[in-house]
Image (tube, rainbow, N blue to C red):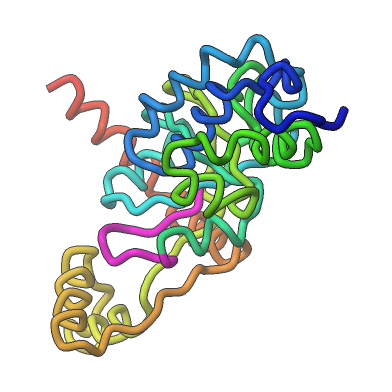
Amino acid sequence: MSSTNSNSAEEHPIFSLAFVQAVNDYQCGGNSAKKAERLMAFRESLPAQFRSCTDICYRQEAQDQKRVWDLIATTKLPMSYTSWTTDLEVAKAFKGGVTPNGQGVIIRVNPPPGSVVLNLVELYKDAEFRSAVESYKSRISRFGDGIGRYKHTQAEVILDLETGTSASIYCFGGFANALELARSIYHRVPTSKEIQAIENDLIEAGTYTSGWWLSHEGSLAVRRRIQPKLTELKERKKLQDEG
């Protein structure tokens, strides 16, 4: 259905100005949980393809070692999240790639039924939605910071996941130079704090290098090496929880 009056909301009965503004606000960034709640108000009125996703979704995180170990040990997300992407390369490049603040990981999840707040991948494929955007863009606050800037480029899916949802680490990320320097300095496998300290020194010296993402196969090999230690880790965590 094409629009004949670019200022008429009635030409876009599914995609109201309020809905398009909510999409735009979410893509502007900020408090994603609060903005996702605004989108939930429109969810039930949307066609099924916009509130479902059969593709694997990815999310980049920078977490402390305990968080990463917990995920490896339990394969459960310890909290709910919002923004994910169906494009692995988008996840890897998010916010400039691997961050020095914590262990870099790419997590993947198969969205459970009912968990999709909004599938922006499918939304941007829809000609009627694109027509609505064109109709409303002059009235959308901060259009250039949201839809006008990102459009479909982030292949984004907004998920509302319950705590304990099954997920897995797809790959690990880091900075090769800092790791190599730490090994040469300590003559052993360095701790995450030791690597972080060297990374900080490199940043201050202006010689910090770009990060890398380990291949999925390489990341599986790392997890296999860690696997024998998981029983001990789980027992230690159980004692901590009971204490």
Residue at 63% across, 16% down: 114
Percent x, y of residue 138 = 54, 40
Whether residue 208 is in magenta: the answer is no
Whether residue 55 can be seen here: no
Residue sitting nearer the eye, 9 or 179: 9
Q: Quadrant of the N terminus?
A: top right
* Residue 173 left/right relative to 112: left
Q: Eyeballing the image, is 55 above or below 197?
A: above
Give the magenta-colored segment's residue range.
96-107
Residue sitting nearer the eye, 220 or 175: 175
Residue at 66% across, 20% down: 9
The image quadrant of residue 205 is: bottom left
Q: Quadrant of the C terminus?
A: top left
Percent x, y of residue 107 = 51, 46
Percent x, y of residue 122 = 74, 36
Whether residue 219 can be seen here: yes
Number of labelled discs? 0
The image quadrant of residue 181 is: bottom left
Q: Eyeballing the image, is 52 above or below 32?
A: above
Percent x, y of residue 76 = 46, 31
Residue at 53% across, 55% down: 91
Residue at 44% across, 33% down: 74
Q: Eyeballing the image, is 14 above or below 109?
A: above
* Residue 96 left/right relative to 46: left
